[in-house]
Amino acid sequence: MHYAKILGSGSYLPAKRVSNDDLAQFVDTSDEWIQSRTGIQFRHFAAENELTSDLAVIAAQRALEAANLTGDDIDLIIVATATPDMQFPSTATIVQQKLGISGCAAFDVQAVCAGFMYALTTANAYIKSGMAKTVLVIGAETFSHILDWQDRTTCVLFGDGAGAVVLGASDEAGIIHSKLQADGSYLDLLKVPAHIAGGQICGNPYVEMDGPGVFKFAVKTLAKVAEDVLAEAGYEAKQVDWLVPHQANKRIIDSTVKHLGLSMDKVIVTVQDHGNTSAASIPLALDVGIRSGNIQRGQTLLLEGIGGGFAWGAVLVKY
Ligand code: UT7
């Protein structure tokens, strides 16, 4: 068994769909500003009592169904999230319990918007080393719970959702190559600085972001990591059938596409419908691409994401 192959995918969006005009009812913003700066038209918001694990479980069930497997076939669950249900235990163990399974390993990965790249790469390493055979990899977020509605520079950008894949050991090509990187010296660009101590929330529990700073860093870094992962795998951009990028801003996606010399009809774009769903954005886009019939078996996919930390990564996959 030389590869970790995507056996099935699934996703879930909470029922409440919010347009830019809906937001403009209570935030000092406009549909024109949001669309022209980001490409976002809609995002979904979880209900107050709907937690990240609730979204993750539905995405996971759909991925298991697509893979023709059940929870009992899973020997590792990895959840990428920056909005866990609780301080502890991990959201992965809560998902495990809600799926009605027990015994397999389960843990969370925290790399914010790059979380799914980190989770997928970790799952790949488990499978390639023989430590796991079938891994449930989930990206799930409820960012609406950590948005400051008084801060129009952040609250219009994010949405909630979950995406999942089942990765299985296979002789057929699956994940070809991946590259993860981080640089903690950029931590002030994007953070939720709060922590809990002495029964109190200490520090701001809402998203703080230097938008233009993140934009500049993301454009430069995503182009480089995409180029690097292709070069290290001995691939050229023209061999990529689909780019499945992190969905934060259509202008960032356009810039990566231009840099790689790809055409837009080779790119899965969902930012208009989902907003930035952080760790959920790439698996959500992947599942939309697969279920719409655009992404076909045997095709080569380039996944890439960047987020707070800063942390970033890219994964080259034969689907
Ligand atoms: O997953 C990684 C996480 N985040 C990202 O990838 C986000 C990266 N950054 C971005 O996408 C962009 O920087 C933003 C979309 C956040 C902002 O776009 P921008 O073109 O960099 O705008 P800006 O921050 O330079 O703001 C331009 C103007 C400002 O007004 P003045 O100072 O020029 O009068 C802002 O006050 O737009 C104003 N503005 C808004 N106006 C209406 C900021 N937010 C809003 C808003 N509605 N929601």
Image (tube, helix red, strand yellow):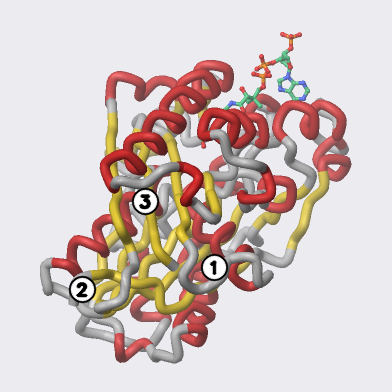
Q: Is residue 182 left or right of residue 68?
A: left
Q: Is residue 211 left or right of residue 220?
A: right
Q: Neighbour class for label 2 at 10 Å: few (<14), some, many (≥20)?
A: some
Q: Earlier in the sequence, mark 3 or mark 2?
A: 2
Secondary structure beneath dot 3 equals strand
**Amino acid under disc 2:** Ala
Q: Please tell me which residue lies in front, 191 or 130.
A: 130
Q: Please tell me which residue lies in front, 87 or 1.
A: 1
Q: Is the residue 50 above or below the residue 117 in the image?
A: below
Which residue shows up at 50% across the image and 73% down it? 297
Q: Position of residue 296 (x, y in %)?
A: 56, 71
**Amino acid under disc 1:** Leu
Q: CA distance from mark 3 to mark 2?
A: 23 Å
Q: Please tell me which residue lies in front, 284 or 178.
A: 178
Which residue shows up at 49% across the image and 64% down it? 299
The residue that mark 3 highlights is 315
Q: Earlier in the sequence, mark 3 or mark 1?
A: 1
Q: Is residue 45 left or right of residue 59?
A: right
Secondary structure beneath dot 2 equals strand
The residue that mark 2 highlights is 105
Q: Is residue 101 left or right of residue 126?
A: right
Q: Is the residue 116 above or below the residue 172 in the image?
A: above
The residue that mark 1 highlights is 55
Which residue shows up at 35% across the image and 80% down it? 97
**Amino acid under disc 3:** Val
Q: Earlier in the sequence, mark 1 or mark 2?
A: 1
